[in-house]
Amino acid sequence: MKVAVIDVNGKDTGRKIELSADVFAIEPNNHAVYLDVKQYLANQRQGTHKAKERAEISGSTRKIKKQKGTGTARAGSIKSGVFRGGGRIFGPRPKNYSFKLNKGLKRLARKSALSMKANADAIVVMEDFNFDTPKTKNFTNVLKALGVENKKSLFVLGASNNNVYLSSRNLKGSDVIMNSELSTYKILNANKLVLLESSLEGIESNLSK
């Protein structure tokens, strides 16, 4: 599939570039996408949640009332979870939520996500650009030229560009990454996917394996 290349001002350069059908025009695999997004979100969880259990509560260990004859349930410790201030019964413990997926499935998920964006006409190919100095206003002007200043956008660079990255860092709805950092979640989370020309070769070579 061919896509027009636009410049930093949002104008058509008159050039078109061929996007690989093996990456941008496959039949999306929804289950692969689901698993990859699930893994991404699971890996964001710290898993440091912890509640004190009965053995970890500070308190007296004496038996608080006699075993029989009170007409109520037996009770041996004030630290029991049934009492106020006692330990948490079956409380959360630290846990690692991450899980593994094979590389082939993750590759399929990213290709599926890119194909979904291509089908939705949400991919823009832009010629490479740079700023003389890091300045948020410069990046805001690019967003306005693309008509995405009020939408989530993901810019994919072919090589590290500190000025472009720093110019976008203060903008909550925009994300700038390298082509090697592309993930299924980030692709789907953006309303508009902006691919710089230099990023295409890396994306297609990584996903065509």
Image (cartoon, helix red, strand yellow):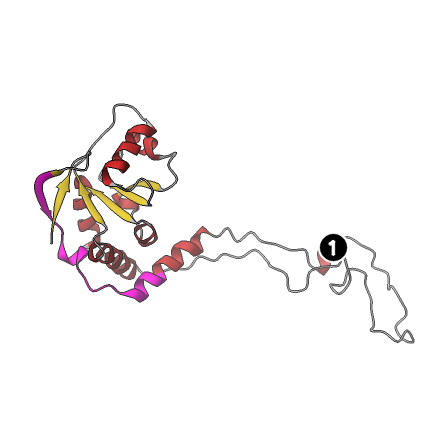
- The local secondary structure at tag 1 comes to loop
Which residue, given by chain and number where applicable, does mark 1 sit on? 57
Which quadrant of the view contains residue 13?
top left
Q: Quadrant of the C terminus?
A: bottom left
> What residue do we see at 29% from left, 44% from top?
154
Q: Position of residue 38 (x, y in %)?
A: 39, 59
Give the magenta-colored segment's residue range: 13-35
> What residue do we see at 30% from left, 49% from top?
191
Q: Position of residue 141 (x, y in %)?
A: 27, 32
Q: Amino acid at mark 1?
A: Ile
Q: Position of residue 135 (x, y in %)?
A: 32, 26
> What residue do we see at 34% from left, 31% from top?
166
Few, some or many C-alpha atoms within 10 Å of disc 1 (few <14, some 14-19, many ≥20)?
Answer: some
Q: Position of residue 73 (x, y in %)?
A: 82, 73
Magenta region includes residue 19: yes
* Viewer can see residue 134: yes
Is 176 drawn above or below residue 102 in the view shown?
Answer: above
Q: Quadrant of the N terminus?
A: bottom left
Residue situated in front as seen by the camera: 75 or 131: 131
Magenta region includes residue 23: yes
* Viewer can see residue 209: no
Which quadrant of the view contains residue 10?
top left
